[in-house]
Image (cartoon, helix red, strand yellow):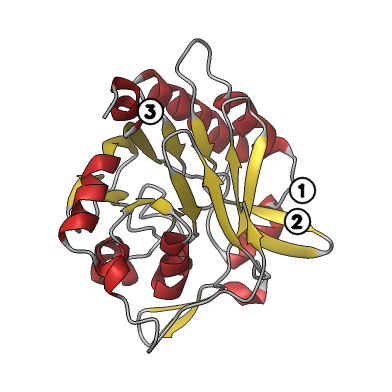
């Protein structure tokens, strides 16, 4: 392998676990500061959490919603344009998006030039009812997206989901079959589903598809109406947790090694062993890429 190929087979992922409050300007200011910090520490791809500009809740979505481009995406565009040679790709968590009389939970991805290269609208809305613990119905205010979303970097192809999207193995399988080597999920699991399923789902998606999985959660705020679990995480293709945050605001880092990914796939070659004569997973809608 050439020196250039070796260099391009590794890159640094930075995951920002942001403390999100009720003042949008403060949320945006903290996000900009931590993106700059992540870039300064060598992050090549930076990931923000779900609803990084607003509290998470059906009563907040319409209040904080913006058109795209708008205030939050303009700030992220500026943040993506880092000075010097340390160029970054910025996965802008998600924000409540207003468009055509509807609201969406949308993730915007920016290239090093600050231009938008992808918009992913959350496909699977978070509608659950766990008696005595939590009931939440995103569909009361949000509409679902209708497309798979992937983007290219000089390092690898990346698939994007938002929070509840991670529960659907088919989505991750389709991303993997389309060449993605990293899946990113801005998410805000809660104090019921977080300890039970947050890490489990990430490890499952990573092992099932032999790729890297990263999640970015808001930091935990016990005074919030919706308390996020935190514990932003990066998992490798062997299913090992290689970086994990606590509950507080912080930035975590992981070195993504694509040669290691290739080695895992060679050692356990499930891609070539699938029985497509017996089963298959296909997409029926359009793709964003």
Identity of the residue furthest to the top in this view? 84
Q: Is disc 3 surrounded by few (<14), some (14 to 19) or many (20+) residues within 10 Å?
A: many
Q: Measure the C-alpha gap from mark 1 to mark 2.
A: 5 Å
Q: Does any portion of residue 210 appear in the rendered image?
A: yes
Question: As rendered, which of 119 and 56 lies closer to the eye?
Answer: 119
> Which residue corresponds to mark 2?
98
Q: Is disc 2 surrounded by few (<14), some (14 to 19) or many (20+) residues within 10 Å?
A: some
Residue at the image point whose x is 50% and y is 59% from the top: 162
Quadrant, the N terminus: top left
Percent across and percent down for residue 262 are 26, 49
Mark 1 or mark 2: which comes first in sequence? 1
> Which residue corresponds to mark 3?
43
The number of numbered discs placed on residues in the rendered structure image is 3
What number is the disc on residue 28? none
Mark 3 or mark 2: which comes first in sequence? 3
Residue at the image point whose x is 58% and y is 68% from the top: 123
User: Quarter-wise, where is residue 132 in the image?
Assistant: bottom left
Position above or below: 273 against 226 = below
Residue at the image point whose x is 49% and y is 37% from the top: 153
Identity of the residue furthest to the right in this view? 100
Residue at the image point whose x is 31% and y is 55% from the top: 211
């Amino acid at each position: 392998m050439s020196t250039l190929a070796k260099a391009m087979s590794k890159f640094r992922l930075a995951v920002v676990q942001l403390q999100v409050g009720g003042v949008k300007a403060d949320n945006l200011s903290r996000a900009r500061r931590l993106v700059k910090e992540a870039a300064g520490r060598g992050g090549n791809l930076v990931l923000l959490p779900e609803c990084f500009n607003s509290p998470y809740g059906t009563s907040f979505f319409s209040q904080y919603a913006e058109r795209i481009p708008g205030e939050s995406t303009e700030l992220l565009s500026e943040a993506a344009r880092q000075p010097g040679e340390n160029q970054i790709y910025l996965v802008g968590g998600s924000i409540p998006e207003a468009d055509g009389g509807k609201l969406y939970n949308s993730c915007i991805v920016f290239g090093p030039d600050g231009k938008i290269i992808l918009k992913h609208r959350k496909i699977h809305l978070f509608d659950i009812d766990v008696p005595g613990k939590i009931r939440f119905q995103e569909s009361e205010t949000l509409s679902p997206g209708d497309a798979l979303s992937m983007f290219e970097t000089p390092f690898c192809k990346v698939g994007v989901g938002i929070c509840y999207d991670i529960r659907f193995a088919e989505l991750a399988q389709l991303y993997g079959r389309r060449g993605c080597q990293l899946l990113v999920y801005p998410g805000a699991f809660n104090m019921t589903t977080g300890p039970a399923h947050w890490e489990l789902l990430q490890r499952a998606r990573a092992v099932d598809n032999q790729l890297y999985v990263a999640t970015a959660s808001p930091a935990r705020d016990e005074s919030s109406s919706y308390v996020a679990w935190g514990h932003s995480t990066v998992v490798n293709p062997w299913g090992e947790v290689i970086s994990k945050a606590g509950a507080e605001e912080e930035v975590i880092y992981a070195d993504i090694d694509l040669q290691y990914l290739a080695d895992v796939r060679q050692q356990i070659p499930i891609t070539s062993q699938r029985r497509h004569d017996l089963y298959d997973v296909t997409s029926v809608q359009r793709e964003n890429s």
